[in-house]
Amino acid sequence: MQLANRLLTLAAIAVPAVFVSAVRGDIPAEERHLSLYHTHTREHIDVVYKRDNAYVSRALVQLDRFLRDSLTGDVHHYDPHLFDVLFDLTRASGRPDGEIQVICGYRSPRINEFLRTHTFGVAKESLHMQAEAIDIRLPGVKTSSLRDAALALRRGGVGYYPASDFIHVDVGRVRRW
Ligand SMILES: [Zn+2]
């Protein structure tokens, strides 16, 4: 009896927590990760942003910084629901481990105003300024297919820019252009 107790104590120390939880029959932690490459800053990020249905705050801070305005360096807190959209898009496109290319994340008001007056297709009240929008493409997936997958999710706005080969997704109203 005493020996058995000692062995149990030893086992508790030696056996990794993951194994213990598996033996207890717990459901393993669900981890959602995102892999992104920013075409302007040329940075890569690969983070678990959600674990057991809870956002990982440290990862959100990293993603906010990664998605900063690449011209001014301004950082804005992103709506994490947009990360769920990106995660589901990689799944829906058959590329769960694919690295998403980011063309534009957060855009500060002054940069948005500059682009709006000097280029075509930039909205005055762009959701990029609320950190609720992102422009992306996914290598290995036709951008028109990525657009269709985003439309099917029905989680916000979807814009298609074939000339520049990217789509815009946001977590605003469900709409398309
Ligand atoms: Zn956009």
Image: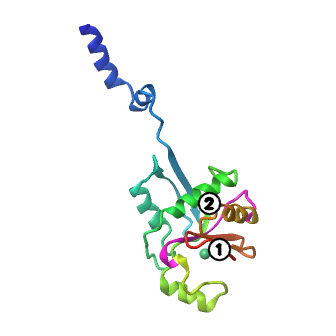
Q: Is residue 56 above or below residue 29?
A: below
On screen, residue 101 above or below 76 = above
Q: Is residue 160 left or right of residue 21?
A: right
Image quarter for residue 172?
bottom right
Q: Position of residue 83 (x, y in %)?
A: 53, 60
Q: Position of residue 46 (x, y in %)?
A: 52, 54
Question: What residue sits 45% from the left and 66% below the top?
Answer: 64
Which residue is pictured at 49% across the width and 53% down the height? 47
For the N terminus, which image quadrant? top left
Tag 1 residue: 175
Highlighted magenta segment, given as a residue range: 129-143
Q: Secondary structure at mark 2?
A: strand
Q: Residues within 10 Å of mark 2 (few under 14, many from 20)?
A: many
Q: Quadrant of residue 139?
A: bottom right
In this rendering, is residue 28 above or below 154? above
Report which residue position mark 2 lands on: 100
Q: Name the mark nearer the viewer: 2 or 1.
A: 1
**Residue 75 tag number:** none
Quick one: 139 or 44, which is closer to the camera? Answer: 139
Distance Cα–Cα, label 2 vs label 1:
22 Å
Q: Which amino acid, mark 2?
A: Ile
Labelled pair 2, 1 in contact (Cβ < 8 Å): no
Question: Residue 18 vs residue 126: left or right?
Answer: left
Labels 2 and 1: the sequence-earlier one: 2
